[in-house]
Image (cartoon, rainbow, N blue to C red):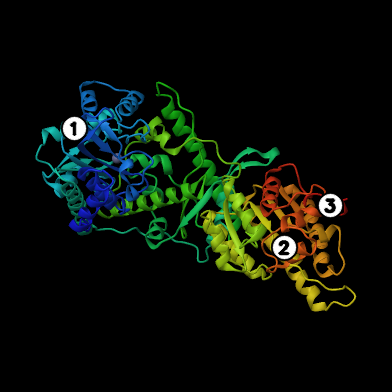
Amino acid sequence: MENLWRDDDAQAMVAAYGTEGVGEDLALRVYTTRLLGGDPRLVLHGGGNTSVKTHLVDGVGQEVEVLCVKGSGWDMVAIEPPGLPAVRLDPLRDLRALDVLSDEEMVNQQRRNLLDSTAPNPSVETLLHAFVAHKFVDHTHSTAILSVTDQPDGPERCAQVFGDTMALVPYIMPGFALAKAAAEVADANPAVEGLILLKHGIFTFGDSAEEAYGRMIAQVSRAEAYLTDNAAKTFAVAALPQDLLPVARVAPLLRGLTAQVMDPAEGLYHPMILDFHGGEAVRAYVNGADLHRYAKVGVATPDHTIRTKNMPLIVPPPDAGQVAAFEAGSRAAIDAFVAGYESYFERHNAHQAAPKTMLDPMPRVILVPGLGLFGLGKSAKDAAIAADIAENTIEVITQAEAIGRFESVSEAEMFDLEYWSLEQAKLGKGAEAPLARHVVAVTGGAGGIGAATAAAFAAEGAEVAVLDRDGDGAAATADGFGGLGLACDVTDPAAVQAATDRVCETYGGLDIVVSNAGAAWQGRIGEVDDAVLRKSFELNFFAHQSVAQAAVRIMATQGTGGVLLFNASKQALNPGPDFGPYGLPKAALIALVRQYAIDHGGDGIRANAINADRVNTGLYAEGMLEERAAARGLSVPDYLAGANLLKREVTVDDVAQAFVSLALARKTTGAILTVDGGNIEAAPR
Ligand code: ZN
C-alpha cells in the first residue's frame, strides 16, 4: 500500500486553511483523513475515524485543550474542518475513572463538551481517541488487517506479522468498555506504533499527522505482504448450469420475493432497490463449492452488521432452463432466511435488559452463484453501500481463507452491534418519502412534460430512469437528480427491451412507467398520406404498447403490482380539424389504457392516463407561441390560459404533479385525469 503523503500537498492545505483561521494541526488532520478515506481497502462508508489533540480558543476567549474527532455523517474522503468537531479534552479524560458509563450518558458527555453546540455527534469511538495519550490517532477497518485477525489463531498471526510494534486488544464492542481496555493496553505498551483490535480493525498513533498516517500505511502493508506470502488456497469451484439467467431477469424475481408484504388487499408492498456487483473476485467467491460454509460465518468487522445484517442470503444458481425451479428455490431460501433471522432475534433479545424491536427480517445482501451479488436497501444509495460492503467482505474472506480459515465475532456480538442504539442512529429513522423504494421509468424525458415528470418522481423519493431518443438529453435530465439516463427509440421494441433490462440491472426492477413520448402529425384525413398516419401510429400507439408490455413482464415477475401511466391527448376526446393523424392513435391509446386496466387489474397493475392540453412545454417551434399570442394581442401565458375555464396557465409541473398523484392513487385504474385548466368539450364522458 502506497504512502500518499506529499510535503507539498500537506503544506498547501495548511496554507489554504490558514487563511480561514484553521490551525496547522487541524489542517493536517484533514489532509491525512482524506488520504485514508480515499482508499476503500482502508475506509468504506463510515468505517473509520481520526482525531488530533490540539488547543483552541473557546467562546469566552480562553484557550482549551480539545480533541478534534471525526463527526458522524461525514465521509472521510471529503472531510472539512467542521467534520472534526472539537470536544473539551479534560472532561472526556475524567470519564476514564468511571467503572461504567451508559451509551446514552457517553453521548451526552461528548455533546455537552463540544465547543460548538451545533456540531455533529462525535464518533462512537471518541473516548478511545481521548483516552490514549498520542496527539494524532488514526483508525481504519483495513481489509488486510481483518483478513489476518479474523482467524481462529488471529493473535498468533498478528504476533508474526507485527512483532512488538503493535499491541493487541481482544474484541470488545465499541463504546466506553472498549475505550478503557484499549487505553490500558496502550499505556502498558508505550513503545508501540498502535493497536490491533482483533476482529475489528487497527489504530495507529503519532506525534505528527505524517507519523500516524505513515504507520497506518506501513502496518497495513505488512499485513498485505503476509497475506501474499502465505496465500496457499483458492476456492474449489462448484458445478454450475451451462446457461444462466441474465441479471435483468434474476433481479426483478429476487426483488419481488424480498419485498415485504405490508397489506396485500391495499396493494401495499415494501420492495427494496437492488444494486448488482458481478466482478471477477465476486464471481470466484459465489461460485465456490464451499460457499455455504465460508459465506455464513459472519461479518468482517461488526459495524458492517447494520448495513448487511449478520448473514447474506444465498440462492440457487439461476439455471436458464429451470426458471420455475430457480424461483421455488429462491422462495424457499428467503423463507428460511426470514425464519432464521426471527429466531436469531428472539434468541438474543431474550437476554436484553431493555427489549429491542425487531428490524425488518429481509436480507441486505444476496449471493447468486454464477452471477454475483446484490446489495439491497430502501434507496439506490443504501443498496450501493450494502453491495460495496459485501464486496469488501468477500475480499476479506477470500484472503482469510487463502491463508487459513475465516472466523467472525460471535452471533451475540453481532446482535449487540446490530441493535446498538448508537449504531441504529447512524441509519436515520425519518419517515420515508411517498415513492421511496419505487423504480420509475419516464419516456420522452429529455425535456418538457417528461423532464418535469421525471424530476417530480425523484422529488418524491423514487429512483428514476429517463428514456429518450435523445440520449444526451435523457442524461442531462437524469443528472439533475442523480438518476439513470438512457438513449431509447421507443418505436423499436428491441430498444425498449434493452432499456428496461438496463433499468432492472441498475435498480433491480420497475414499478411505475410514465409512457410520455409522443409527437403530433397533421393532415386532412381524406387526403393524408398513409405513411404519415402509420408513422404516427408507430409512436403514438404502438410505442406505448411496447413500453407497457415490457413493464408488465417485469411487474408480473415481481408480483408486487405496478402502475402504467400514459400521456394521452385532448385530440383523443375532442378531435380538432386536420388532427386525425395525431388524434386517431391517441384515441386508440385511451382504449389501450382501459384494456390494461381490465386485463391486469387482477395483478394489482393500474393503468391511467393524463389528458393535458395547452401546456407550454417549451418544445414548440421557436417563436410559434409568441406569434399566435401576439396575433391576439396577448402574452404567451395569457394566450395559453385564455382558452380554459379557470383562465390559468397550465405548466409542465402541473402535469408532472398529476402523474405523481395518479401513481399514489391506489384505488384508481382505467381513469383519464384532465389537466387543462378546464375545457368542457374535452371532458371525458
Ligand atoms: Zn472501528
In the picture shown, does residue 211 fall above or below 581?
above
Q: Which mark is residue 544?
A: 2
Residue ID for mark 1: 183
Residue ID for mark 3: 679
Q: Is mark 2 within 8 Å of ligand 1?
A: no
From the top left corner, tell me how far across and down residue 343 is, in percent.
47, 33
From the top left corner, tell me how far across and down residue 373 is, in percent.
45, 54
* Residue 55 can be seen in this image: yes
Element class at badge 1: helix
Q: Amino acid at mark 1?
A: Ala
Q: Nearer the viewer, residue 192 or 617?
A: 617
What's the residue at 72%, 62% (across, down)? 544
Residue 258, picture quadrant:
top right
Between disc 3 and disc 1, the foreground one is 3
Q: Nearer the viewer, residue 232 or 610?
A: 610
Q: Amino acid at mark 3?
A: Asn
